[in-house]
Image: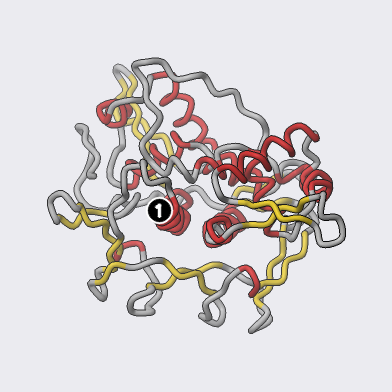
Amino acid sequence: MNATGSSASAGSPTPTPSVGVTELPAGGPNALAVTLGLLGDEWNLWILRFALLGSRRYNDWLALGGISNSVLSSRLAVLTAGGMLERREYQQNPPRHEYSVTRKGQSIWPVLITMWSWEKQWAPNETAPLPPLRHSTCGNDFTPILRCKECGEDVDVRSLDSQMGPSGDFSRSVPEATSRRRSTKSERRPEILAHTMELVGNRWSAAIIGAAFRGARRYGEFAEITGAPPAIVADRLKHLTEIGVMETRPLPDRPQWSEYRLTDKGTAYFPVVMCMISWGQRWFRSADGPDIVLHHKACGKRFEARLGCSACGEELRSSDIEAIDLTTSVHVPGPGWS
């Protein structure tokens, strides 16, 4: 799983500290929209994963195979503009550049680890299995447990109170539409978290999931909260039901009508959502305030996500996580860190 290429270095890359919090203009896309736009893209995650494992130069990613020059160039530009990578010149004649991971980029590891864990448990059987994650501190395989940063208690969807903040209008929470060129025969989709992308890789699927966690159940509620066109709401609800993230139930007062509920599979995605929100609010700030305000009911404090080890209970650190290669029994860096 180590990156290949001439500049890939051994060990953990040192993030550049120069890129800090990005201030977003009032009235524009909020932190959630920007986060979904960056992390709801397979190639962005693929590039970041190998950047965290040591890839630096353009040819490092090309050598890994499957990505075209145009896709790589566009995604590197997006990740640089988003402050997750920093472009530096290492040769003047001819000009050559390399890309360093910023602290903003390195700090996505909780998002990756929760995506990895959800994918491992819930991806269809025909999907190639992901290796287990091991906590080097205790030596056990583990599942990341979502916790409150302030009090350290485990949390789930029932543990939090949520209120929309000043920038939380759903029209500002959906990433702008992007044009994605169809892959050619010489390209492949990146083999990373493909089932997860069914939820966050489509902007309206992500919006529907967010509305469901806010308590939406009926078609009209999803349409009102997301502001999506009726045909799109119907299509996304149908798709999310087909992949087992949501299910329909007859309404008690109108049995001929149905409502939509998250299944166990859908509810299990909650840690991913919370880690994405925490990461986005840490690094992107709207001038008119946050998009969503979360409080932990048990301690009453503002909620910020932390992850714990299901085996030993200790708080997880990126440097203490490994993936186990089942074919060789070799311990290798986890899904995007070392």
Q: Is 217 on the left or on the right of 58, as rendered?
A: right
Secondary element at tag 1: helix
Give the quadrant of residue 28. top right
Q: Depth check: 228 or 52 in front?
A: 228
Q: Depth check: 106 or 154 in front?
A: 154
At 76% from the left and 55% from the top, the residue drawn is 250
Give the quadrant of residue 226. top right
Residue 76 x %, y % = 44, 31
Q: Residue furthest left?
A: 328
Q: Is residue 266 visible?
A: yes
- Look at the picture and state if 321 lies above or below 225: below
Q: Is 248 on the left or on the right of 195, as rendered?
A: right
Q: Is residue 107 visible?
A: no
Type of amino acid under label 1: Trp
At 56% from the left and 43% from the top, the residue drawn is 200
Residue 268 x %, y % = 53, 61
Q: Is 334 on the left or on the right of 169, as rendered?
A: left
Find disc 1 in the rendering and name its residue: 116
- Look at the picture and state if 192 lies above or below 149: above
